[in-house]
Amino acid sequence: MVLAGGEGKRLMPLTADRAKPAVPFGGKYRLIDFAISNLVNGGFRHIVVLTQYKSHSLDVHVSMTWQLSTILGNYITTVPAQMRKGPRWYTGSADALFQNMNLLDDEQPEHVIVFGADHIYRLDPRQMLNAHIESGAGVTVAAIRLPANESDQFGTIEKDPNSSRILGFHEKNPNAPTIPGHPDQILASMGNYIFDAGVFREIMTADSDDPSSNHDIGGDILPKLVATGDAHVYDYIDNIVPGETGSDDHYWRDVGTLDSYYDAHMDLVAPLPAFSLYNREWPIFTRGTNEPPAKIADGPRGPSVISNSVLTSGVIVVGGRISGSVLSHGCRVDTDAEVTDSVLLDNVVVGEGARVNRCIIDKNVVIPPGFDIGHHPDQDAERFLVSPNGVIAIPKGYRIDQALAAATRS
């Protein structure tokens, strides 16, 4: 079960028209592709994607991308909020699972894997399941070691030093306990869980009947299972994914904000990337396109210059300069235009002589000739949304006023 109903308010304007798991990433993927690819690569092929907010593009992507052979009974399908418990939306992640308990009645599984849909990582879920079965846990929580100063952003796990049992779960607590012997690190939940099916039914039903609960996995379900001794932890460092190298193993990033989304893209374009898209032993799958190959051509005033960048199919660069950037399907960079340290989604056009720096530009935006973005912070803050770390975000289809473009060129 993939939880894909997130609203993603902190990723605005990228989530103005789409659910967070449907946000494009890495030139050709959607965020949800990473969670589903991990499950499919691990051999799990009965997958439901639970959706809610602005789910149309997500539904289309899953239906057109994730088509498995039905001859063996495999499937990946979206399940919208069906209001089985009354005329209301999901009130939390646990409520979403409870309202879809009928799916367990259909499948009768021994274990239920629950993954979030909006993280960038590789993980072999089969290894996690083996650890879950060996421990006899009611629930196993995947966890990663992070700097202690990030404990206010994640659920922090307090582990028994002699076993995998969880002794305490601290939801976004700035004073959460650190790892013994490592005072600068915490063990943070990755938002991935494996439940014993019987425990899953019992705890989700009890939580639904609890009027004091917020019906959240981290805030409500895990503390209850910790109290009964049924919660165990799986340390991500023990997961060995085929094909990973020393430079990109055990990478995980929550891309819940514009700055983390931007930083994750910058991880891709480094000469030795912190996360590689080129692991053929554990591929990230996505929808294919009929776009032609990328084309790099000389312009009338000199050749194109490209360094440390990812260019997807259909990209055309004619005498432009690109550095440290990700260009998605169908982007075009014209003569003497400059794109540095930026993320361009599908069909963005950067006109002749324009300059773009430290930007996230959503689909179908045209940057007029000579226009400058990212070099004058005060002007940029007046025109566009700027993140706390100074990254400029331009929404899908945004039209730059011609008068403003003329004023910039002058």
Image (cartoon, rainbow, N blue to C red):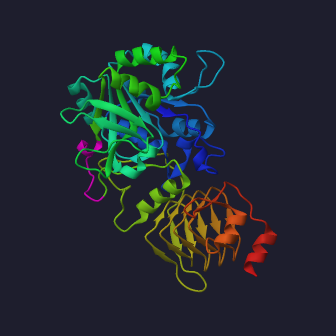
Q: Residue furthest front?
A: 175
User: Which quadrant is the C terminus positioned in?
Assistant: bottom right
In the image: residue 300, left or right of residue 4: right
Query: Compared with residue 114, is residue 381 higher up or lower down, i.e. above or below?
Result: below
Find out whether residue 49 is within the magenta segment: no
Asked if residue 9 is positioned above or below residue 225 in the image, the reply reads below
Asked if residue 335 shows in the view, the reply is: yes
- Residue 199 locus on image (x, y percent): 36, 17
Residue 285: in sight, yes or no?
no
**Residue sitting farthest toward the right:** 403
Q: Main secondary structure of the magenta part?
A: loop
Q: Is residue 389 above or below residue 253?
A: below
Residue 169 lies, in percent from the top left, at: 37, 33
Which quarter of the figure has residue 218?
top left
Residue at image location 46% in from the left, 67% down from the top = 309
Determine whether 233 is above or below 240 in the image.
above
Of residues 390 and 157, which is closer to you in this image?
Answer: 157
Nearer to me, 30 or 375: 375
Q: Residue at x 30, y 30 (%)?
A: 167
Q: Is residue 193 left or right of residue 63?
A: left
Give the quarter of the image for residue 358: bottom right
Residue under the image location 72 percent in, 64 percent down: 383
Question: Of residues 292 and 360, which is closer to you in this image?
Answer: 360
Q: Position of residue 77 (x, y in %)?
A: 50, 29
Q: Residue furthest bottom?
A: 301
Which stretch appears magenta? Answer: 236-247
Image x and y of residue 12, in percent: 62, 49
Q: Quadrant of the N terminus?
A: top left
